[in-house]
Amino acid sequence: MRCLAIPLAFSAACGARSGLRAPDVESLTPDVVAGEDARVMDSGPDVTIGLPPVDMSCPGRCPFGTLTPSFPPFVRLAPPDVPPGCSNGFELGGASGGCGRSTYTLVSTRPAGANAITLDVDLATYLQPDGVMVTGIDAAGRAYTLLQTCRMQTSILGGPSTMRPPDDTIRQFRLPVRAGTTRLVFDFGAVTSPMYIQVLGLCDFAVTPFAQAAFWRAIQR
């Protein structure tokens, strides 16, 4: 059965890769990325799969204003590579924006903070670039940036806000969480269009629901 992609209305009848899922489509995203992108992205330590997670050209925190979109080319998605005993997480779509008013905080279940781990992240943004920032905070209150996007756009069509989107609209990241991290803060304040994110590798954090999204689902593997 071949599935057709229709903006803002995706059929769920085509099966699922993980959780809720929309059908695969062909060539929904431009295949080019500006050469400058490679110079302003910081891959961080020991990241070998996925896109560099920090866009150094993002102008601080939101609002970002009008930025030229960047379309990273699609790369076939890698399977999850978090440890088998630490493969839980969450997925959500359609996070509501609003600078300083849309943050999702996960607290470590370990008194000394989480063990070091690299999170698997799938992220999609449609219609416009969406600003998403992930920050780690240690017991002393020191913060470090795991992910910051402000220009990335992965589709020129509308996408679903209540299910996992087609694979070719997803871009992958690997985020190294430092040992002793007590909180992870997901900031969706600069989200301006439908979006989707899945995060795996959260066994040392209490994964609680997030109400400011069109859908949220815990993932247990």
Image (tube, rainbow, N blue to C red):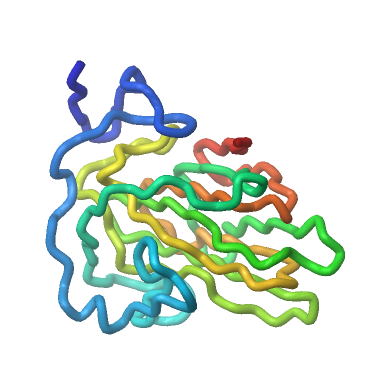
Farthest residue, direction right: 111
x, y percent for residue 6: 21, 30
Task: Identify the residue at horizontal 73%, vertical 55% (top origin).
Answer: 204
Q: Is residue 36 shown above or below 161?
A: below
What residue appears at the point 79 percent right and 75 percent down from the top-left corner?
139
Name the residue: 24% across, 76% down: 37
Across and down, in percent, residue 166 comes to: 30, 37
Q: Is residue 36 left or right of residue 204?
A: left
Q: How many tags in the picture?
A: 0
In this picture, is 92 found above or below 116? above
**Observer-nearest residue: 46 or 150?**
46
Residue 195 is situated, as x and y percent measured from the top left of the image, at 39, 48
Q: Nearer the viewer, residue 8 or 153?
A: 153
Farthest residue, direction front: 84
Return the x and y of residue 55 as percentages of the image width and height. Answer: 37, 75
- The quadrant of the rendering that contains the N terminus is top left
As drawn, is 172 to the left or to the right of 176?
left
Camera-side residue of 135 and 82: 82
Q: Residue at x 55, y 68 (%)?
A: 176
Quadrant showing the C terminus? top right
Q: Quadrant of residue 48?
A: bottom left
